[in-house]
Image (cartoon, coloured by chain):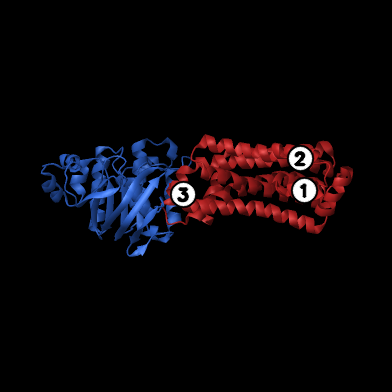
């Protein structure tokens, strides 16, 4: 599905990605983990074409994404910080995104699921952080794109919404979608992820299943395994 | 691109500032016409206001809109839309709604006053055309400044400086150079120098179409020889067009390389 070759990116003097290679196959949930500033968001934004890499190639289904934009029809993206134009109403925002993408969508179902009906006529600037995140989730889950990228989807969610989100992610996985997730909540990752991609200093430090990670680091829970991974000398 | 244009345009049309801007011109038009009772004089007064105000409003609005719609832009960047369409659409939305406020705000009082029956119709349309051009030029320049500056305050500062330079400082330097080099023939120099500033160019273009250009003396005659003819008119309008197209071209070029 996604193939990344020798990706380099620096912002000014700050090297974020240095020769990253990654291959992600079709179907399944991939958790992209790593300490703060390890390049998770930059990697995701490079796939989306929001960040232009200094060098290296990214292929989506065999075709390079360089200078392209049509390929984004195959991607749904949930940004880390839900920044929306504040003067729009929730309803208007959803309608606008639908109008821009021109694809079949199932937003009603999601709106009921996250109990957003009372907020539909409110302006986005008046919503709380958690409600904004729910709108964010509706916007990214309402289309049927084969690739779903979620950057910190759990931020600000209450327990009920979190359970809903997990259910939703599992449903999407069963449809055969490829899902990339970044998160710092290890319990969440342990519950849903099929495979872990660990980024450190702009490179892939570890890629494999949770079990492989546990045996490698000789830890019994994921949180400690992740904390220990950087100090384990063996590379992938 | 047209969808983005549509959303930006509606967003602006709904905002209070477009109305304020529109009402300002409406009021100005009515007051000038009914106090002056002379279309030609009203056109001159309007020109003096438009030449300074339109670039200022275009610059400030452009910078403000660009920074305020950062979230909107980020949302759009993740959608299957070409990058250049996003920025061109936003630019045309801003420039379009500002030009519309100007043209409608001034057009309505003049039409009601009976501009179609008067001789000043050509002067007046030239005023509106240059006003629209100045809006397009300065909005494009301000978009260029904002896309190159992440820092809002810096971007705002540069934009205001640009306006100040074009509207005030440039003229000062121009005059000073005329005084310093008065021993030399300056006809072509002043013609070229006028071309390099869209504000000066617009002013000269309108002034020379009006009768008062007879008062300008020898230099006026040289200018009139150039700007007064059809060739001069087309060259000046072409230069204004170039002033619009170049910043737009740079905007699309930079937007392709920028990280968000």
**Residue A150 versus residue B53 in the image, above or below:** below
Q: Identify the residue shown where x is 82% and y is 45%.
A: B184
Q: Which residue is mark 2?
A: B177
Relative image position of residue A9 (x, y in whole percent): 37, 49
Q: Are marks 3 and 1 in contact (CB under 8 Å)?
A: no
Q: Which residue is mark 1?
A: B189
Asked if badges 3 and 1 are on one and the same chain, I answer: yes
Which colour represents chain A? blue
Looking at this view, is B114 or A41 the one in front?
A41
Badge 1 element: helix
- Residue at the location (60% across, 48% down)? B140
Q: Which mark is residue B164?
A: none
Local packing at callout 1 (Cα closer than 10 Å; few below 14, some 14-19, many 20+) is few
Chain given the colour red: B
> What is the chain identity of the residue bearing mark 1?
B
> Of B176 and A143, which appears nearest the observer?
B176
Q: How many marks?
A: 3
Secondary structure, mark 3, is loop
Nearest the viewer among B207 and A74 is: B207
Q: Are marks 1 and 2 in contact (CB under 8 Å)?
A: yes
Above/below status of A180 relative to B172:
below
Q: Describe residue A224's horizontal placement relative to residue A151 as left or right.
A: left
Chain letter of the residue carrying label 3: B
Please check whether the numbered discs 2 and 3 fall on a single chain: yes
Circle number at residue B258: 3
Residue A31 position within the rendered picture, expressed as x and y whole percent measured from the top left: 24, 49
Residue ID at (79%, 50%): B188
Give the mark nearer the N terminus: 2 vs 3: 2
Asked if residue A122 can be seen in this view, the reply is no
The answer for which chain carries disc 2 is B
* Left or right for B132, reference B229: left
């Amino acid at each position: 599905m996604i193939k990344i070759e020798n990706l380099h990116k620096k912002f000014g003097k700050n090297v974020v990605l240095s020769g990253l290679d990654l291959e992600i196959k079709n179907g399944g949930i991939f958790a992209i983990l790593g300490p703060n500033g390890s390049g998770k968001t930059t990697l995701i934004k490079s796939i989306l074409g929001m960040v232009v890499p200094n060098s290296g190639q990214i292929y989506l289904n065999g075709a390079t994404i360089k200078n392209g934009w049509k390929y984004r029809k195959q991607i749904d993206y949930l940004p880390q910080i839900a920044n929306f134009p504040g003067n729009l109403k929730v309803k208007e925002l959803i309608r606008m995104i639908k109008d821009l993408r021109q694809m079949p969508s199932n937003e009603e179902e999601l709106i009921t699921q996250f109990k957003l009906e009372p907020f539909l006529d409110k302006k986005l600037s008046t919503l709380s952080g958690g409600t904004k995140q729910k709108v964010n989730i509706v916007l990214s889950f309402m289309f049927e794109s084969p690739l779903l990228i979620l950057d910190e989807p759990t931020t600000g969610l209450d327990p009920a919404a979190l359970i809903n989100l997990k259910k939703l992610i599992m449903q999407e996985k069963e449809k055969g979608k490829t899902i990339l997730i970044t998160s710092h909540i290890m319990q969440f990752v342990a519950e849903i992820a099929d495979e872990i991609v660990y980024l450190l200093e702009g490179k892939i430090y570890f890629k494999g299943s949770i079990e492989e990670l546990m045996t490698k680091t000789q830890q019994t829970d994921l949180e400690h395994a992740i904390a220990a991974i950087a100090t384990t000398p063996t590379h992938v | 691109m047209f969808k983005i244009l549509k959303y930006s345009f509606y967003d602006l049309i709904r905002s209070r500032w477009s109305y304020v801007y529109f009402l300002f011109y409406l009021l100005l038009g009515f007051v000038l016409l009914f106090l002056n009772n002379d279309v030609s004089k009203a056109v001159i007064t309007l020109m003096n206001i438009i030449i300074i105000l339109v670039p200022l409003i275009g610059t400030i609005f452009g910078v403000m809109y660009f920074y305020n719609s950062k979230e909107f832009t980020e949302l759009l960047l993740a959608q299957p839309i070409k990058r250049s369409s996003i920025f061109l659409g936003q630019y045309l939305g801003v420039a379009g709604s500002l030009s519309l406020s100007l043209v409608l705000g001034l057009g309505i009082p003049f039409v009601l006053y009976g501009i179609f029956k008067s001789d000043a119709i050509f002067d007046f349309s030239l005023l509106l055309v240059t006003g629209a051009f100045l809006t397009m030029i300065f909005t494009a320049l301000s978009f260029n400044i904002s896309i190159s500056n992440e820092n809002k305050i810096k971007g705002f500062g540069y934009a205001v400086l640009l306006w100040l330079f074009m509207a005030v400082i440039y003229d000062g330097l121009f005059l000073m150079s005329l005084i310093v080099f008065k021993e030399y023939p300056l006809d072509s120099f002043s013609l070229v120098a006028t071309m390099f500033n869209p504000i000066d160019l617009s002013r000269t273009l309108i002034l020379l179409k009006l009768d008062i250009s007879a008062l300008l003396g020898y230099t006026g005659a040289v200018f009139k020889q150039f700007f007064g003819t059809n060739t001069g008119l087309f060259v000046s309008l072409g230069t204004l067009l170039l002033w619009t197209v170049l910043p737009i071209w740079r905007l699309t070029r930079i937007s392709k390389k920028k990280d968000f």
